[in-house]
Image (cartoon, rainbow, N blue to C red):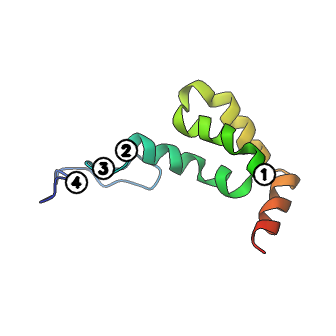
């Protein structure tokens, strides 16, 4: 509270809700975008990164693309890629 990151009257949050921290290098919306797309960044091959970035920056206008990428993140290709990426 001393640094202004929180006011002190914020309700307890879950990890699926937007951050209550303010005055950070990243806005709450940027944090939310990364949180939403984290699985896509970690499970999809690099050829999808530019599409994931579009969803991260502008989710509202890329909902169908996001849904497609989520589906792809559970595909055999993505699962195979994430296994290879661990090596």
Residue 21 location (% of width, % of height): 29, 52
For label 3, the residue is: 20
Labels 2 and 1: the sequence-earlier one: 2
Compare residues 44 and 9 and report the one nearer the observer. 44
Residue occupying the far top of the picture: 61
**Mark pair 3, 1: CA separation:** 31 Å
For discs 2 and 1, the disc positioned in front in the rendered view: 2
Q: Callout 1: 10 Å neighbours few (<14), some, many (20+)?
A: some
In the picture, measured across the screen, residue 15 lies left or right of residue 40, that is: left
For discs 3 and 2, the disc positioned in front in the rendered view: 2
**Mark pair 4, 1: CA separation:** 36 Å
**Mark pair 2, 4: CA separation:** 11 Å
CB under 8 Å between callouts 4 and 3? no
For label 4, the residue is: 5
Residue at the image point whose x is 65% and y is 52% from the top: 41
For label 2, the residue is: 28
Disc sitting over residue 74 in the figure: 1
In the picture, measured across the screen, residue 27 lies left or right of residue 66, that is: left
**Mark pair 2, 1: CA separation:** 27 Å
Compare residues 58 and 67 and report the one nearer the observer. 58
């Amino acid at each position: 509270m001393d640094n202004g990151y929180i006011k002190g009257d914020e309700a307890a949050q879950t990890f699926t809700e937007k951050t209550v921290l303010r005055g950070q290098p990243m806005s709450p919306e940027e944090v939310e975008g990364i949180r939403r797309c984290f699985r896509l960044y970690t499970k999809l091959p690099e050829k999808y990164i530019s599409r994931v970035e579009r969803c991260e920056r502008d989710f509202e206008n890329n909902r169908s693309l996001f849904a497609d990428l989520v589906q792809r993140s559970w595909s055999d290709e993505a699962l195979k890629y994430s296994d290879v990426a661990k090596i």
